[in-house]
Amino acid sequence: MLRDKLKPNGPTLLNRIHIDGWLLAALMLLMAVGLITIYAAGGKDLGLIQRQTIRLGVAMLAMFVVAQVPIMLFRRVSIYFYVVGLAMLVAVLLVGTVGKGAQRWLDLGFMQFQPSEVMKLAVPMMVAWYISRFTLPPKTLHIFAGFILVIAPTLLIAKQPDLGTSLLIASSGFFALFLAGMSWKLISIIGVLGSGFAPVLWFFLMRDYQKQRVLTFLNPESDPLGSGYHIIQSKIAIGSGGIEGKGWLQGTQSQLEFLPERHTDFIFAVFSEEFGFYGVIGLLLIYAAIVARGMIIAVRAQDAYSKILAGSITLTFFVYVFVNMGMVSGILPVVGVPLPLVSYGGTSMVTLLAGFGILMSISTQKRLLLRQ
C-alpha cells in the first residue's frame, strides 16, 4: 500500500517527449551566452543574430527529433551509418567541391554537404557497436580493430585537409575504446608510438600552412603582422579583460576590429575581454555542468553500447571546448575548432545538438522503462 502511494503517477512531460531537463537548461543557457557574445563580436549586427537564431532553432529541432529515436535503433543502424559516411568521405576526395584551399564538400545540386560532420557521430556509434559485441574489457585484438575503424575516417578527413575535425573524430573513437576498458598499459604504448609517428606526420603528411601554424604556436612574435597576428591579438584581448572585464560591448580588441575571426573561432577572446576572469569562470561552469550531466547519463545507461556512446559523445564535447580555448589562449596550435554553441556557425552546431539528442534518448527512455 505504502509503495503504491509513493510510486510516481507517471513520467513527466519532458520525459514523455524524451528531453532531459537538466541538460536542456544548461544547453539553452550556453546558447543565450553565445547570442549575447555574437552580438558584441559582430559589431551589433542584428542580421547576424537572426541567422544564428534560425540555425539554433534548426539544431534544436534536430536534437528533439533524434531524442525520439530508441537507442536500440541507433545500435542497429550504426554499421550502415558508418559505411555510408566512409563512402561519402571517399567521394569527397574524388569529386568533392574545393573551397578556400580545402576539398571538404559534396555538391548535391540544391546544397553543399560536408560528410565529415556525419562522422562525428558515426565513428563513436560504430566503435561502441563493435566493442559492445564482446566481453568487456575488450581483448587487444578487438582494440586494434577498433583503432582501424577510427583511423580510416580520420586519415580521409585529414587529407581534405581538415585537421580540426579529424582531431575531434579521432578523439571520439579513442574515448569509446577507453570507456570500453582499454588498459593504461596499451594507452601508454599507443602514446609512445604516436610520438614516434610525429616526424612522419611533419615531413610527409602536414601541409606548409599547417607546419606554419605549429611554428607560430611556438613563437607567434616571430611574425607579429603575419601568421602570428591572430594569436597575439587574441592573447591581448584575453589579458586586457582582467578580473571583471571591460563590460559588454566595451571590448577594444573586438569593437575596434583588431581581433580577426572574432565571431567564429576566436569568440572566446571577445568574451574574455568583455566579461573578464569572473565571466570565464561562469562560462566554464556551464560547460562543466553539461559534461557532468552527460557523464551521469553514461554511468546510468542500461547497456554497454549506451554507456560507451554517451561517454564518448560527452568527452568529445569536452575536447571541443578544451581545443578552442587552448588555441585562442595560445597553449595549443590554431586548428579551426569553434567554441561549441557560442561561436557563430551552422553545420557543426546541428551535429553537436544531434549528439545531445542521443544522450537524451539514452537518459529519458531509461527512466520511462523504470516507471513502467
Image (tube, helix red, strand yellow):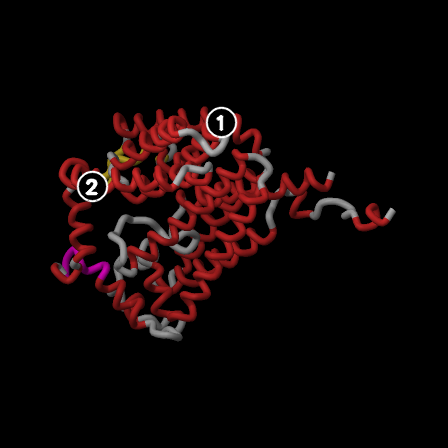
- Residue under the point 33% across and 72% down: 241
Which corner quadrant of the image does residue 264 belong to? Answer: bottom left
Residue 126's x, y, as percent?
Answer: 44, 30
Assess disc 1: are there few (<14), some (14-19) or many (≥20) residues with their C-alpha within 10 Å of its C-alpha: few
Which residue of the protein is positioned furthest toward the front in this rendering? 185
Query: In front: mark 1 or mark 2?
Result: 1
- Residue under the point 29% across and 29% down: 92
Residue 102's x, y, as percent?
Answer: 24, 38
Q: Amino acid at mark 2?
A: Ala
User: Between residues 326 and 351, which one lies in front from this camera angle?
Assistant: 326
Q: Secondary structure at mark 1?
A: loop
Is 32 contained in the magenta span? no
Which residue is disc 1 drawn over? 134
Residue 140's x, y, as percent?
Answer: 38, 29
Which residue of the protein is positioned furthest toward the right in this rendering? 1
User: Between residues 300 and 361, which one lies in front from this camera angle?
Assistant: 300
Q: Main secondary structure of the magenta part?
A: loop
Residue 31's x, y, as percent?
Answer: 47, 56
User: Marks 1 and 2, how far apart in space?
Assistant: 32 Å
Which residue is disc 2 drawn over? 198
Residue interval drawn in magenta: 224-231
User: Is residue 28 toward the left or the right of residue 255 in the image?
Assistant: right
Q: Amino acid at mark 1?
A: Phe
- Residue under the point 71% across and 45% down: 11
Which quadrant does the C terminus fall into?
A: top right
212 over 156 or under it: above or below? below
Residue 2 appears anywhere in the view: yes
Among the two numbered marks 1 and 2 on one chain, the one whose residue lies closer to the N terminus: 1
Residue 58 appears anywhere in the view: no
